[in-house]
Image (spheres, rainbow, N blue to C red):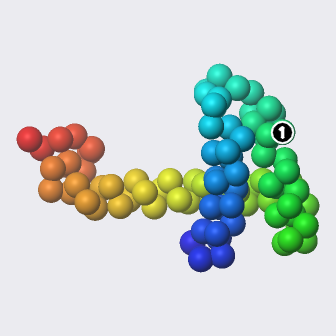
Amino acid sequence: MTNEDREFLKKITDYAEQVMGDIDPEKVKISEQIERLRPILQELAMVHKMPVEDVFIKYMDLATEAAMEREQKFKEDYKDVIDPAGNPTF
């Protein structure tokens, strides 16, 4: 992930924390979550000259990539206490 990608993702996640900090994503419809994110998605669409839908898709792709990076780092950090199957070794 590039620094530009990280900044793109950070703008959306920071905004999401402000407007959705009080909701449970498991209980709120995706359409409502997207509606709450629409202002930042539209802003980024204008800045990057992309359709709003493409901004959302890029956001989802980057969020997935970031989650995979965090999982990989966790596995590396705890490789001495977790076996390859993910079970504790103690």
Nearer to the camera, 67 or 34 = 34
- Location of residue 73 by image quarter: bottom left
The amino acid beneath tag 1 is: Glu
Q: Is residue 71 above or below residue 1?
A: above
The residue carrying pointer 1 sits among few (fewer than 14), some (14 to 19) or many (20 or more) residues within 10 Å by Cα, namely few
Instruction: For mark 1, give the secondary structure.
Output: helix
Which residue sits at x=70%, y=55%? Answer: 12
How far across and down, in percent of the image, does residue 25 sit? 63, 31
Which residue sits at x=50%, y=53%? Answer: 67
Q: Is residue 34 above or below residue 5?
A: above
Q: Is residue 13 left or right of residue 37?
A: left
Q: Is residue 39 left or right of residue 90?
A: right
* Residue indicated by mark 1: 35
Decide if residue 43 is in sight here: yes
How far across and down, in percent of the image, does residue 51 sit? 91, 61
- Location of residue 4 by image quarter: bottom right
Which residue sits at x=45%, y=61%? Answer: 69
Q: Is residue 69 above or below residue 27?
A: below
Q: Is residue 85 left or right of residue 14?
A: left
Q: Is residue 47 left or right of residue 8?
A: right
The extreme front residue here reads 18
The extreme left residue here reads 90
The extreme bottom residue here reads 3
How far across and down, in percent of the image, does residue 90 sit? 8, 41
Which residue sits at x=90%, y=71%? Answer: 49
Decide if residue 60 is in sight here: no
How far across and down, in percent of the image, does residue 35 sit? 84, 39
